Amino acid sequence: MHRKLSRDASRNGKKREETLKEQANLPDPGLSPAHGIGRRDLLQGAAALLGTALVSPHGATAQTIPEPPAAKETGFVPPSVIASDETAITETATGKVRGYIHEGIFTFKGIPYGDTTAGSGRFAPPRAPRPWTGVRSSMHYGPVCPQAPRGTWGEDEESFLFDYDDGYPGEDCLRLNIWTPGIKGAGKRPVMVWLHGGGFVSGSCQEHRSYEGERLSRRGDVVVVSLNHRLGPLGFLNLIHFGEPYAASANLGMLDVVAALEWVRDNIGNFGGDASNVTIFGQSGGGGKVGALMAMPAAQGLFHRAIVQSGSFLRALVPERSEILTRAVFDELNLGPSEVDKLQSLPLQTLIAAGDAALLKTHPPTPLVWNRVADILGWGPVVDGKFLPHHPFAPVAPAISAQVPMLIGTTLNEFTTSLNHPEYEAMTEEEASRRLNDMYGVDPKRILEVFRASHPSAKPFDLFSLAMTTQVRQGAVIQAGLKAAQGTPAYLYWFQWKTPVLNGRPRSIHCIDLPFCFDNTDRSENLTGGGPVPRALAAPVSEAWIQFARTGNPNHSTLPHWPAFSMATCPTMIFDNTCTLQNDPDRAERQVIQRT
């Protein structure tokens, strides 16, 4: 079966390569103003040529306007952006939307998948969006969920590296974005639904430049969807014990995502997508959201494949822990239990500030223990016995998603780099040992010995970074093993490419994989350095994501053979300038950390 999937993936990839080669060989005659092309000619001619370029390698044709006979003779070249009152219009269940076309990809932004969560919608389950008349302009991102100010705004180099776009806040934040090669009768393409990172308390669908889905859509002939949802106290304040009106309050952020997936099921056909082939993928907190969805009965059947990037959160919050945070929020607001309804009318910033202060008091800075990361993050999904009946991946993988294959991995250095602390580069072995003792509390010299054996030329800080990051990798290995135990394929990767930016101090940092899986290394050049070297790695990485979304198998012609995971061999795809497949490349390191 897996060999057949691999052959199908290879054939699909070759078809796409042939189509792209044909398009690359189209003449570029230039635009001559002497031909007197008018506005209508410009729009119609551009749409025509773009329509020609939107022939799917799978035989489906996107929305197309017939090419004017004189277009080739006039030397017409379409503009990069086609945006007009007549362009890129399609239907949704609640009304028509109009986007724009950029270099052949239809783009729609800020489409409501739910009603506003303000007022009576605060702490209530997501409601269907209100219908509208006419055509709704959908060309710009919608509001992001209100959240506490970014804690790293003062870190100049980190802000440069990630070039954050924090958007504008608003409780009308249940919005999604779509990138697609064709609309209406344009075929049935795989759908890839992106869930942003930021734990469960921050972030948005536009926070990172790499989140833009245009290049991934074009490369893979896929439909890419991203979305915003409620976060922090708006999405996860546990008010369950206050009665039925608040029965869903502890998991509202996840129920928002379920509502978005239901919207995709009901509407994505009008955007050229196949509702029976939906992949959910997310990084960091987004990966945790993927894991939670796999255990939620309400999400069953809404997706068919799952990708977890640096986010193998095996456990969710238990009610007792989340209620501690709830009580702290009430204390910050000077509210008693009988005043719970006042939360709906509080000024938004007052509520957000109270949630942030309560989080700091109940979850002070503490060593990161990945399997219990939900307890450290504070806000997040709660095992409430109804919407989330049990922990996502503890002690076993969720049975309701047993047939969903997974792609799982981490980066080499994750959170432990010298980005904001250049002095760490001079760390001595004694200091590394002391810091490891603070973290693990047992035999730090033995830990360093094991890591030194595998990395004989590494600096002490590199050994420290690897030792600190191993537990993140271990979470991914455990999750892959639990999925494989269900008899369903899981594929494990380890992203080890290091950025050259800032003297290489960020290393293979948390989020470094994002520009590569989205094929956006030039768009994210502050992080990657841009240019041909990261671009060359983005091709096989993004193609693996595409093939997995298409078939459930990430294998393709430019990677070594990638077998499905087994605990016996722990096959791991190493993504670097040269991609290799290694069996259990860090067993000794994981074992010594696990013993701690």
Image (tube, rainbow, N blue to C red):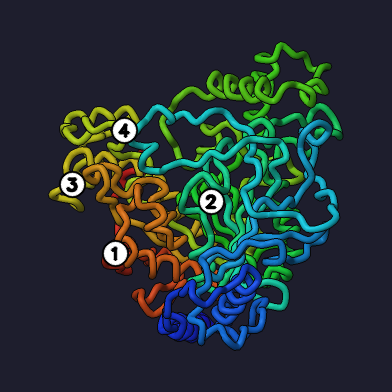
Give the CA separation, mark 3 to mark 1: 33 Å
Q: Is residue 126 left or right of residue 390?
A: right
N-terminal-most mark, 2 or 3 = 2
Q: Which mark is residue 420?
A: 4
Disc 2, SS: helix
Q: Is residue 40 above or below residue 371?
A: below
Q: Amino acid at mark 3?
A: Arg
N-terminal-most mark, 4 or 2 = 2
Q: On the image, numbered disc 1 is attached to which residue?
A: 532
Q: On the image, numbered disc 3 is attached to which residue?
A: 452
Q: On the image, numbered disc 2 is attached to which residue?
A: 287
Q: Is residue 258 above or below residue 105?
A: above
- Rendering coords of residue 195 (x, y %): 58, 51
Give the CA separation, mark 2 to mark 3: 31 Å
Give the CA separation, mark 4 to mark 2: 25 Å
Q: Residue furthest left?
A: 457
Report the front residue among 502 and 51: 51
N-terminal-most mark, 4 or 1 = 4
Residue displayed at 69% across by 49% down: 175
Q: Nearer the viewer, mark 2 or mark 3?
A: 2
Report the front residue among 283 and 563: 283
N-terminal-most mark, 3 or 4 = 4
- Rendering coords of residue 384 (x, y %): 72, 39
